[in-house]
Amino acid sequence: MDLFQKCRDFTRADEVKAAGLYPYFRAVEENEGPVVTLEGRPVIMAGSNNYLGLTSDPRVKKAAIDAIERYGTGCSGSRYLTGTINLHNELEEKLAAFLGYESVLLFSTGYQTALGTVSALVSKGEYVISDKENHACIINACMLAKGGFAEFLRYKHNDMDDLERVLQRVPDSAGKLIVTDGVFSVSGELVNLPDMVAVAEKYGARILVDDAHATGVVGPGGRGTAAHYGLIDKADLTMGTFSKTFASLGGFVGGPERVINYLKHHSPALIFSASPTPASVAAALAALEILETEPWRIEKLLHNADKMRDGFKAMGFTVMDSRTGIVPVVLGDVERTMLMWRKLYDKGVFVNAFIPPGVPPNLSMLRTSYMATHEDEHLDAILNVFQEVGRELGLIS
Ligand SMILES: Cc1ncc(COP(=O)(O)O)c(C=O)c1O
């Protein structure tokens, strides 16, 4: 059988495109933040992870442009060799101080951070233990560790009793890493870190929290999940991304100096991949400074998300609860979700359609997310369009 036969047999996406319901790979032609241009017309963006609204901030843009002028467009090498510029070191130091970790290490994306951290830390005979609903990059990171002969175990979503049951099966003497999303990326739910810490301490396990959707949103000053619970000294490692609140591209992991130093010298995803570009690092540095000096952005983001959560609920939609920028509207059925997505899009609102296998069966949803720069006029327009389309499809009365 030809290796490519499965590719020719895969026609599902073409069928959905032919039906006019395909929501993916839509090209944004201009991006002003809350409003983008798609197919030549303005559309309200209610699906971006640009939570603090900084991708179009003039200060962030200028920092990126200045960095290109000084350092050029790329680093042309890995951090290990010729690809380190002083902006990388500056961002690592500032982020470590902000998060309250001894050291921070940058990677080129959040995805690579997960691969590079978990697979370098958890080796043959050691155990990585993951929440079943962690982000795909964590699951793939665990698979990579497993490929290096580590043991990969999973526990029921955010269920610390099940985590304990899993840990009971692990030999006392083995090194153990528990990995969890801080804010789960689909639902916006927060991990139960206090109970996780108690279980981890009982079984001698270390904890890695993925704060991709939490840094800049959750905890005092946006310092993330561990800070939210006052447990910064108990979450051994926290990783995150610059692709969301930091309005850029890249990833990071923070932790004890000795561990970060080890990763620097043992992580193939760091050593064999080019470093983040000068523009990306400078943009993230500028965003970090804004995050620290303009706390109103977090308050406004949470206020906006609360308003939308309440608004959708009042109309009769099923909404998942959290205190983050993520507001998922659960529709259940795949066809209904795709149809509603298309109708919203036609009426000028862009959201994300999440269907299996990205979500469990019967949990298809429109994942909406908000920015600090959404104003009431944008939010009210989104609510009105949801109401109109929801009624048209008979989903609400
Ligand atoms: C929880 C989580 N971790 C990691 C990532 C990956 O980050 P990046 O976009 O920087 O690769 C994402 C991005 O979608 C995410 O949601």
Image (spheres, rainbow, N blue to C red):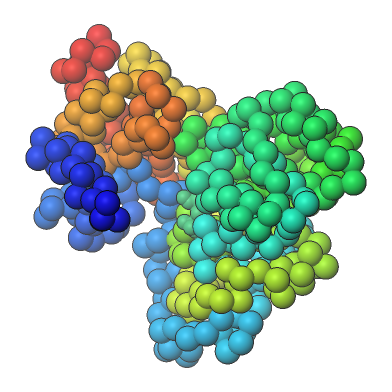
Q: Measuring from the top left, give residue 142's x and y in whole percent.
A: 61, 49
Image quarter (top left, top right, bottom left or bottom right) of the C terminus: top left
Q: Measuring from the top left, give residue 334's x and y in whole percent.
A: 28, 26
Q: Nearer the viewer, residue 311 or 197?
A: 197
Above or below — where is 27 with respect to 105?
above
Please give the name of the residue rendered at 61% of the width and 71% of the height, measured from the top-left corner.
Answer: 268
Residue farthest along the front direction in this orientation: 1
Q: Measuring from the top left, give residue 53's x and y in whole percent.
A: 42, 54
Residue 285 visible in the displayed image: yes
Residue farthest along the top direction in this orientation: 397
The quarter holding residue 28 reads bottom left
Q: Nearer the viewer, residue 260 or 99?
A: 260
Residue 295 visible in the displayed image: no
Please give the name of the residue rendered at 65% of the width and 36% of the height, measured from the top-left corner.
Answer: 154
Above or below — where is 396 with respect to 108?
above
Please give the name of the residue rendered at 82% of the width and 31% of the height, measured from the top-left corner.
Answer: 168
Q: Measuring from the top left, give residue 341's x and y in whole percent.
A: 23, 33
Number of numbered callouts drawn: 0
Q: Nearer the viewer, residue 134 or 173?
A: 173
Please give the name of the residue rendered at 51% of the width and 78% of the height, measured from the top-left corner.
Answer: 274
Q: Horizontal placement of 158 versus 294: left or right?
A: right
Q: Nearer the viewer, residue 4 or 336?
A: 4
Q: Horizontal placement of 29 versus 120: left or right?
A: left
Above or below — where is 290 with respect to 91?
above
